[in-house]
Amino acid sequence: MTDERKNVTGDENTAQIRRSGDRIRTIVCTVKNEAPFFLEWLAYHRLVGFNRFVIFSNDCTDGTHEILQALDAAGLINHFDNTEVPEDLPPDPQMRAYTRANAMDLVRESDWILVIDGDEFLEIHTGEATLESLFAALPDRTDAIGVQWRVFGSGGIVDFDDTLQIDAFRFAAPKDFACSPNHLAIKTLFRPDLVQRFGIHRPVYKGTSGNDRNPVLFVNGGGTDVTKDFLRGRWCMPPQLVSYDLAQVNHYMIRSHEVFLMKRWRGTANSSNAERINLDYFDKYNSNFERDDGMAPWVQPVQAEIARLEAQVSGLSQMVRTARKVYSDQIAQLTQRLRTEAPEDYRRLFDPQIVQAEIQAQQDRLAALRKKPGQTGQLRMMPPERKAPAPPPPRMAERAKNADEEALTDGPEDQAISVQAAPSWLVDLRAGPSHRGFFQSFDQTGLHFVDRGSRDLVISFDNLSAANIDQVDRESWGYGFIRKNGWSHLGVFAYAPNWFRERAMLEHLQRLAKDGFFRDFDRVTMIGTSMGAYAATALAPLAPGCTVVAFSPQSTLKKKLVPWEKRFAAGRKADWTGPFHDGAEGAKAAGKVWLIYDPAMEADLQHANRFEGENIRHLRARYADHKTALFLRRADMLSTVVREAVEDKLTEAGFYRHYRQGRNIPWYLNGVALRIAGSRHPERLRRFEAYLKTANRPQIARSLHLRFPEIMSSAS
């Protein structure tokens, strides 16, 4: 494996040696659960002329990792497991991969680099439709070409099957109207010489570039110089500069509706947050305005190339078939869940009449826009779709009229108030089945309550990563999960890293308790992680007998009680006088307290040891580090643990039974390796290497030689 620690970017103070050849054409790609689709993507890009593939995968559960390992072993790609989150690399999987790639000789020695995702295909429109033809058409000394996205919709295809994407999905966004600013995004094919770092849509150039000594030529999809616009910024092409003449990047963002449902569930390679991939995302990117058959000539060559790859790599075809079966089974489960939990969403995605009506509406709208006078053919932004407001119910008409007459306004000259997206909990209160609740805002914290008619109340507390995020449309921690389970929910927002020590908020909660708010529920569960876990334990006296689920909790940050705690400087500066200042004390009021932590984290262990009493349950999440909740989510058990705790079904034996399913994920295995390397018996890494190979984790086994070269060489 290539040594990732090397970097060949050179000295910025000297003139760069500029590449002029076209020999090494590299794609850098991040993937997550792409097993049914990856061979098509690889086969196509091999055919158009790419000859080096650097693939990063994270959190795969469908066989993607194993397929990539087999291709790596055959020398067809270079695969790197990107699941682990080292402290010195970005937490975002995609940016972590790009940071790693940017430091690799394997990548930096390339003549050309394209950074794309597994659902993106570079389609070339010039000459033989290969890279050779594209390079021949570019102006001399081109450093980068910003290739225009073209977003493809589902075309009304609902089912997941084995048809090639480039064959099945032939309806896309129009070329003369941009459906949204994001539809104008580019992907960049570039030479790496003057590049400082990689980005999702375009590279970032060094500060010493773009002058007479180190000039840069950045062109658009038609070969026109757009360096002035893109040297220092931008990832979307200005409408007047958009061109598809030389190439486009087909982005199959939706695929079939069943595949979209899977994407919604698993998140993306650059995020594990599935909540952002919702029906708003579907509506924005399910672009079926006009037909595009540009990839049709490639269908048979790609099928033949896939057959060659499967013949070349032993067992590959069986691995793909198995992955498709796993994928299909997961779709069947998710479809049934959607039908039960969100019947309206189910009809949106799977009712044939609704699906076809939406596509027809898009195409009719485009036809109407093109008929309007004054159309020049130059790309324009598509005007927002105007929908007539629904008339109020007859019994409300008079009240609405009176309300208009009494509105506080000086007339039409008043400036319009900017509209912000409504948070999900507010949408639920006004547009969903739950119409009872409240929102209370304070300077540094906030509360929202949604009464879903359940006798279970879950109180969730934000963690530290949410602090300082104060946009109005964000959700409280765990909101989507709690909503899916139908529990009533009190969400506690943190807009600052003050460990919920805001006096006004605490006094408000005390008033709610005095008024019997918490006694209205049969069961109350408080949940949180780290900072939020402190609050969940400390505020247990508000609902005596409640259940607490605390991931990696701090018991307190009051210096006199925990003088050894040196982390969380902002929290230690908060006001720790007054009530609820000690979670270890507050937890005594709870019926049951589940403390989930990694005992090897010394500070976390010291906090956990401060909790005493028969109601305390210690669950040791070994090798999870401080991020126990994130580890449990990666191991696909977080929701199960919390659900069982809320329903009073969680047991210590059950937790460890669940936990064992995470012992083969890269996070756990890398943690084991790190602990062994730091032990008094580092030579055991050799035995661990052998185990990893038998456990089908050869990538991690090979990484031991990079991470611990001295230990591995001395142990040999």
Image (cartoon, rainbow, N blue to C red):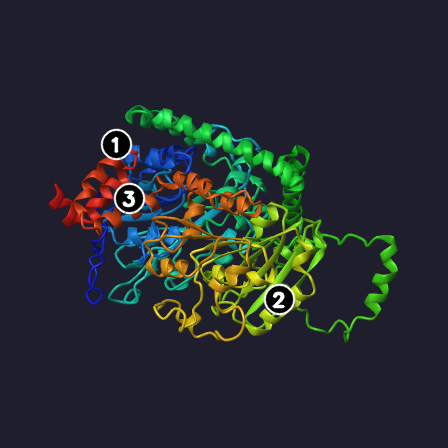
Using residue 257 as the reference point, say whether residue 208 is left or right of it: left
Kind of residue indicated by mark 1 = Ala
Circle nearer the N terminus (2, 3)? 3
Which residue carries the number 1 mark?
74
Report x, y in % for residue 612. Answer: 45, 58
Task: Say which residue appears at 56% left-offset and 48% top-offset.
Answer: 646
Would you call the spot at circle 2 few (<14 residues within 10 Å), some (14-19), or many (20 or more)?
some
Q: Give the spatial CA distance, label 1 vs label 3.
A: 19 Å
Check whether the beta carbons of the residues at disc 1 and disc 3 lie within 8 A of each other.
no
* Residue at disc 3, secondary structure: strand
Check whether the beta carbons of the residues at disc 2 and disc 3 lie within 8 A of each other.
no
Return the residue nearer the eye: 572 or 92: 572
Height in image: 167 above or below 208? above
Would you call the spot at circle 1 few (<14 residues within 10 Å), some (14-19), or many (20 or more)?
some
Kind of residue indicated by mark 3 = Arg
Q: Does any portion of residue 253 appear in the rendered image?
A: no
Height in image: 285 above or below 506? above
Circle nearer the N terminus (1, 2)? 1
Q: Give the spatial CA distance, label 2 vs label 3.
A: 61 Å
Q: Does any portion of residue 76 appear in the rendered image?
A: yes
Using residue 108 as the reference point, say whether residue 612 is left or right of it: right
Indicate the quadrant where residue 224 lies: bottom left
* Residue at disc 1, secondary structure: loop
Report x, y in % for residue 486. Answer: 63, 46
Report x, y in % for residue 213. Answer: 24, 66
Which residue carries the number 3 mark?
25
* Residue at disc 2, secondary structure: helix
Kind of residue indicated by mark 2 = Leu
Which residue carries the number 2 mark?
509
